[in-house]
Amino acid sequence: MYGSGILLILVLVLFADWQKIGRSFFQLDIAREMWPRVLTIAARNTALYTAFAFLFGLVLALALALMKLSTIKPYRWFASAYIELFRGLPALITIILVGFGLPLAFGWRIPGGTLGKGTIGLGIVAAAYMAETIRAGIQAVPRGQMEAARSLGMSPGTAMIYIILPQAFRIIIPPLTNELVLLIKDTSLLFVLGTTPVSKELTKFARDAMAQRINATPLTVVALVYLAITLPMTYLVRRLERKTEAEKR
């Protein structure tokens, strides 16, 4: 396998048309034209959409996780149905449903424009995945913690808030960070909602610049910006996972 990979790389290096590749993907004058707007507009909007959607999804996911662990059957049924539904639907379908389906059906607009629609659309999908992560984290906390809290006179709700959830979130920080990385990339789907020059996220910004200049260099620039955002976060996830494993030992 290693030999085949090295051979394939050598073939690409020897026979690729590097001049054509350079003209198509690495035009410095086009890249310079994108600065600083690629950071001040596109990257800023991507970070903004991600942060709002993650916070909305996290709050909703916590409620869903507690409902799924509830002793009340209708709560468990609702949470299970929600999680299975929005994990099964493509995120793009959910975004279109929130952005266009609900306003058409009920005759009202979601406030906040692209930010409001994107927050709800992406947050609904993210919540379905994070709910299962939070549920697993709560169940990973030893049962004795709840029993000890109850023996001290705490109510189940108080024990959950002050004893169980802090320990659960410490366990699930790595997978939640991984979900945040995925959410950053999913903001590229928000182009379907329509954008203004000041509300474009990274992918839409690159597509418009590429169509204007008939060149793929904007995709290269935006890919580097995505990597500059996501690589440190994935490194952080690995560090957190190793730290968690070390604490378990």
Image (spheres, rainbow, N blue to C red):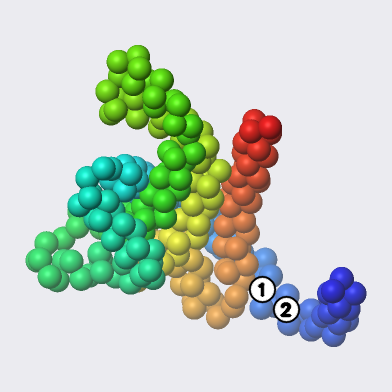
Which residue was labeled with disc 1?
A: 25
* Residue 83 sits in quarter: bottom left
Badge 1 marks a residue whose secondary structure is helix
Front in this rendered view, residue 176 or 168: 168
Q: Which residue corresponds to the image point at 45% horizontal and 26% vertical from the top-left?
A: 144
In the displayed structure image, the side of residue 34 where residue 159 appears, left or right: left
Query: Does residue 25 appear in this view?
Result: yes
Query: Does residue 13 appear in this view?
Result: no
* Residue 58 sits in quarter: top left
Q: Hey, what amino acid is under mark 1?
A: Phe
Tell whether label 1 touches label 2 (CB within 8 Å): yes
Q: Position of residue 73 (x, y in %)?
A: 22, 50
In the displayed structure image, the side of residue 99 where residue 234 appears, left or right: right
Badge 2 marks a residue whose secondary structure is helix
Which residue was labeled with disc 2?
A: 21
Between the C-alphas of marks 2 and 1, the distance is 6 Å
Label at residue 77: none
Q: Which residue corresponds to the image point at 34% horizontal and 25% vertical from the top-left?
A: 159
Front in this rendered view, residue 242 or 163: 163
Q: Position of residue 3 (x, y in %)?
A: 90, 74
Q: In the figure, 30 relative to 168: above or below?
A: below
Q: Dividing the image into 4 quarters, which one contains the N terminus?
A: bottom right
